[in-house]
Image: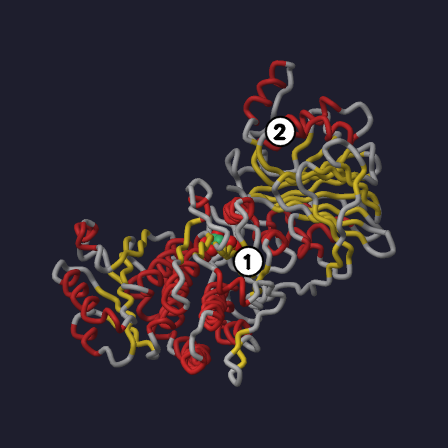
């Protein structure tokens, strides 16, 4: 997944583009680059590594006022991470430049076709194949050359193309990858981006390209053509997103800041969404009626990574609170299953970014099967929000760190209210609904207690940071919680950590246990207390160091575990909140001790927009 950006207008294109790329770096930070037209010449600058490396490189260029510009942040798919494979890519004559998000599946075939005609390549990327084909077809009309090239491409893409002889024109096209184009009311400037939130400006008129549409973009004007090359009228949305430059607000890392934000973000997720006097749940722009909800026969949840973990917890909520069969599927797998959809299947797609390709692809399959769809998302105007019948926003604010924290706890909070809402529509009594919400309202203060005790977790991290292998174990909601905690540790500390159902360890995995293989036990599930204590004894008997996260009052744990971090007690359903935050801190402090790149871990990106 990559981020593409383009600008043509009356402001400084390079400044606008670099601000846009800062906003897009979450989509990949293996390399970045820009290309612009300056006094009839194509100027390109690109560099492997973070955006800061490109900024250094740009300082070497004489200051230029480009006529127009395109830019790119890369997450490598074809070709290793180096300067040559960074975008933009130019044709052989250095006259045409392209930036691309997506994957061209038949790039090898297309590359060989050109190679037979004597075309040489300077990179290993699929993107360079596209620009070389455009160059082959170019006879003076840039959009015609792009329109000739697109039908050859198999796969998905969002591209922006410029030519040195067309200093006021960007050609853009998209298939399944997000591409937003914005113009101002005064028609003096045009923006394009993988994510409209990267425009860095509010009050634009925005349209989204899809299905091989091609746009000719000039200062403040856009013409869009369909695959038949007919000029079409596109739906335009007013984009009022308030652009706020991200800030760590004094924290050392965005991740730590976002962990600390959770008491307030959970409040925002639930505030005004449960009316205690009437025991009614209310979501904005929620179009599923009481009748719809009463007829639901099954709920199928789609998500990836941390969002899938939220979905697994939510599936428990829907079954326990609303008595509806519910399952959560990893979206990349769900696409290739043969789900038994019925007309009364509700499909819930969970995605913080709203751009995860696997989740969106699986959602599209569910829509094609006629299911009602609901999005759970944190980013307005993202693809997911445009493709679901309704969407419930987390209201958590931008989550900058690649490692998702506040989004998860807000997802669980929102989904618990959704389960309550469906349960109430299907006869749950108001008193028990109010009782649940009373417990949910305590979660922010419980999390604040964990934050206030985080110095203890820092000390524990010092003790466990040298280990390279961990089991995380738990039961019921704590099994899912331990998988999430293991993912945190994996992705920011590069440590082999795996979440396991505590009852499953003895069916094989326990063979790995040894004194250099600690177990982190998530014990905050009272329903299975005796069982988790037995599991602790089993791993202790085999010499594993044990760090336990346990609720105050579960004193027996202290007699078995080497270390215990005590959590504020709560009901089993809500235990994931405090246990998850403790796991977030553990991962954070271990990553810091190990000197890892905490906000932009290697090989990752904030939003995985390729399948
Ligand atoms: C979580 O820490 C990871 N960064 C990753 O698993 C993430 O949750 C996953 O890629 C899904 O992203 P989404 O919520 O934006 O769809």
Residue drawn at x 54%, y 67% as measured from the top left: 290
- Is the CB of mark 2 within 8 Å of ligand 1? no
- Quadrant the N terminus occupies: top right
Mark closest to the chain's N terminus, 1 or 2 = 2
The answer to which of 432 and 294 lies nearer the viewer is: 294
Circle 2 SS class: loop
What colouring style does the render use?
Answer: secondary structure
Residue position marked by numbered label 2 in the rendering:
153
Mark closer to the observer (1, 2): 1
Residue drawn at x 35%, y 63% as measured from the top left: 481
Residue 589 visible in this rendered orientation of the protein: no
Residue position marked by numbered label 1 in the rendering:
375
Figure check: 68 above or below 548: above
- Is the CB of mark 1 within 8 Å of ligand 1? no
The answer to which of 349 and 248 lies nearer the viewer is: 349
| Other residues around mark 2 within 10 Å, as few (<14) / some (14–19) / many (≥20) | some
Residue 174 is tagged as none
Where residue 99 appears, as percent x and y from the top left, is 66, 39
**Marks 1/2: CA–CA distance:** 30 Å
The answer to which of 440 and 91 lies nearer the viewer is: 440
Where residue 554 appears, as percent x and y from the top left, is 23, 77
Q: Is residue 581 left or right of residue 204?
A: left
Residue drawn at x 75%, y 50% as measured from the top left: 235
């Amino acid at each position: 997944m990559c981020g593409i950006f383009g600008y043509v207008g009356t402001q400084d294109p390079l400044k606008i583009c670099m601000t846009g790329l800062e906003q897009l770096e979450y989509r990949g930070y293996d390399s970045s680059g820009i290309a612009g037209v300056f006094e009839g010449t194509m100027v390109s600058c690109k560099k492997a590594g973070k955006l800061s490396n490109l900024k250094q490189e740009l300082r070497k260029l004489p200051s230029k006022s480009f006529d127009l510009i395109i830019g790119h942040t890369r997450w490598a798919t074809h070709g290793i991470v180096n300067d040559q494979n960074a975008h933009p890519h130019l044709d052989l004559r250095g006259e045409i430049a392209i930036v691309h998000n997506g994957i061209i599946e038949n790039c090898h075939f297309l590359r060989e076709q050109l190679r037979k005609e004597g075309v040489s390549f300077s990179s290993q990327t699929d993107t360079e194949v596209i620009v070389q084909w455009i160059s082959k077809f170019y006879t003076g009309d840039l959009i015609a050359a792009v329109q000739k090239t697109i039908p050859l491409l198999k796969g998905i893409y969002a591209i922006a193309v410029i030519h040195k002889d067309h200093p006021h024109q960007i050609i853009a096209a998209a298939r399944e990858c997000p591409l937003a184009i914005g113009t101002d009311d005064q028609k003096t400037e045009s923006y394009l981006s993988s994510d409209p939130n990267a425009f860095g400006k509010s009050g634009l008129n925005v349209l989204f390209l899809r299905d091989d549409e091609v746009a000719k973009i000039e200062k403040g004007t856009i013409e869009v053509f369909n695959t038949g090359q007919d000029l079409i009228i596109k739906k335009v949305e007013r984009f009022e997103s308030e652009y706020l430059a991200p800030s760590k607000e004094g924290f050392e890392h965005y991740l730590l800041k976002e962990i600390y934000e959770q008491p307030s973000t959970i409040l925002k997720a639930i505030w005004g969404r449960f009316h205690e006097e009437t025991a009614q749940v209310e979501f904005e722009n929620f179009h599923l009626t009481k009748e719809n909800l009463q007829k639901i026969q099954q709920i199928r949840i789609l998500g990836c990574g941390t969002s899938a973990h939220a979905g697994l917890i939510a599936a428990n909520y829907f079954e326990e609170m609303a008595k509806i069969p519910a399952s959560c599927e990893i979206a990349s797998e769900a696409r290739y299953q043969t789900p038994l959809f019925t007309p009364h299947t509700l499909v819930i797609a969970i995605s913080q970014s709203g751009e995860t390709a696997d989740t969106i692809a699986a959602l599209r399959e569910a829509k094609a099967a006629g299911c009602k769809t609901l999005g759970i998302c944190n980013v307005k105007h993202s693809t997911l929000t445009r493709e679901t019948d309704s969407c419930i926003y987390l209201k958590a604010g931008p989550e900058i760190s690649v490692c998702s924290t506040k989004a998860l706890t807000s997802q669980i909070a929102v989904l618990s209210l959704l389960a309550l809402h469906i349960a109430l529509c299907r006869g749950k009594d108001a008193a028990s609904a109010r009782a649940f919400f009373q417990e949910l309202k305590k979660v922010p203060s419980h999390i604040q207690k964990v934050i206030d005790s985080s110095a203890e977790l820092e000390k524990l991290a010092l003790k466990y940071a040298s280990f390279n292998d961990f089991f995380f174990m738990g039961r019921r909601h704590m099994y899912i919680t331990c998988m999430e905690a293991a993912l945190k540790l994996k992705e920011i500390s590069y440590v082999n950590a795996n979440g396991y159902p505590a009852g499953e360890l003895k069916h094989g995995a326990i063979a790995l246990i040894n004194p250099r293989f600690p177990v982190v036990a998530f014990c905050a599930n009272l329903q299975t207390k005796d069982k988790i204590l037995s599991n602790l004894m089993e791993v202790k008997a085999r010499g594993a160091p044990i760090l336990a996260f346990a609720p105050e009052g579960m004193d027996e744990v202290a007699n078995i575990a080497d270390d215990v971090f005590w959590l504020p007690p709560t009901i089993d359903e809500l235990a994931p909140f405090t246990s998850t935050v403790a796991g977030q801190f553990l991962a954070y402090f271990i990553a810091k001790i190990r000197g890892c790149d905490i906000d932009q871990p290697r090989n990752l990106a904030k939003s995985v927009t390729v399948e």
